[in-house]
Amino acid sequence: MTTPLPATVIGGYLGAGKTTLVNQLLRHADGQRLAILVNEFGALPIDEDLIEAQSDDLISIAGGCICCSFGSDLTAALIDLAALDPRPDHVVIESSGVAMPGAIGASIGLLEDYALAGVVVLADAETVRSHARDEYLGDTTLRQLRDAHVIIQSKTDLVSADEAAAVSDWLNTVNPKAAVVAAVHGQVPNAVVLGSGASPRTAVPSEHSDGAFESRVYRVDGPRDASRIAEALSSGGYGVVRGKGFVECHGGETQLIQTVGARATVAPYQGEVPFEVVCIGLRGQLDTAGLAAVFAAH
């Protein structure tokens, strides 16, 4: 059985920073083959120094990544990507500023070759609250935010620290289930946006700090209850923005755990993999002792 392709939807209102984030993902792909899907190339200017070749409907990026235009038929473009040899490791769909990323995420769930890795919505720290109050923009802005599993608070360098904190608090009230993280110039580790490793076969990163984020890897020795572990990681009580890894369950089967914000999935996995789970969170906010207890207890 072919492993489903993970797909991440990136949304957010016009000017929130989606293009900056996508270019940042491509610059830090680190060998992962990313496929970026956009409505039209004019809406997503890829940094020129990344481009190796360009045709009418495809841009080849250094390092094996590609960008494709899907026009009005996203499903057909996704089916074509899944048929590529080699396939991409991860698909990123950059939705238009007025699209509902949750609806796109739901459509991904209908395709047997795909698994939704998460919905990531950007929120401009300068303008998101005024957009939400606007007579014409408000409903769209709020619906996009409520669709998110992760909200990236962009352009925090353009507001004061107090204003950024106030916006973060407001975003948490709009969508209490989403993980809210701040970014300056789109600088967010790829693992926060895509999950830890674009492919389940990608080795999880070692313990490290990356600017505002840190990760910890937990060895899972012996059979465990994967569902209970996933529920604990996604509860919000341990500061985990993203979690991903493999657990040996009672009965000997291997389960792949993935969490993004309050969303968690557990699925069977075939293959030889290390029984480890990586947890990524804001620096200083990961409850490392509590997480160690979770993996020991369950």
Image: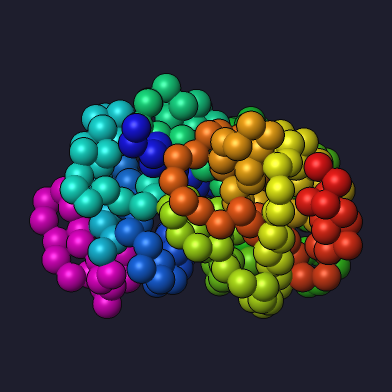
Can residue 81 be seen here? The reply is: yes
Give the side of residue 236 with respect to residue 13, left or right: right
9 or 194, nearer to the observer: 194
Can residue 124 be seen here? The reply is: no
294 or 103, nearer to the observer: 294
Quadrant assignment for the C terminus? top right
Give the side of residue 14 with respect to residue 155, left or right: left
Q: How many callouts does the rendering have?
A: 0
**Quarter assignment of residue 277:** bottom right
Report the span colored magenta. 42-63
Q: Is residue 56 magenta?
A: yes
223 or 78, nearer to the observer: 223
Q: How is the image coloured?
A: rainbow
Give the side of residue 174 with respect to residue 22, left or right: right
Which residue: 39% across, 39% down? 3
Which residue: 70% across, 42% down? 223
Which residue: 83% across, 63% down? 288
Q: Is residue 16 magenta?
A: no
**Quarter assignment of residue 50:** bottom left
On screen, 243 above or below 79? below
Quadrant assignment for the N terminus? top left
39 or 188, nearer to the observer: 188
Q: How far from the left and from the top, in percent, is residue 266?
A: 61, 35
Q: How far from the left and from the top, in percent, is residue 139?
A: 64, 30
Q: How far from the left and from the top, in percent, is residue 154?
A: 62, 61
Q: Residue furthest top?
A: 110
Q: How far from the left and from the top, in percent, is residue 295?
A: 79, 51
Give the side of residue 287 with respect to residue 35, left or right: right
On screen, 230 above or below 210? above
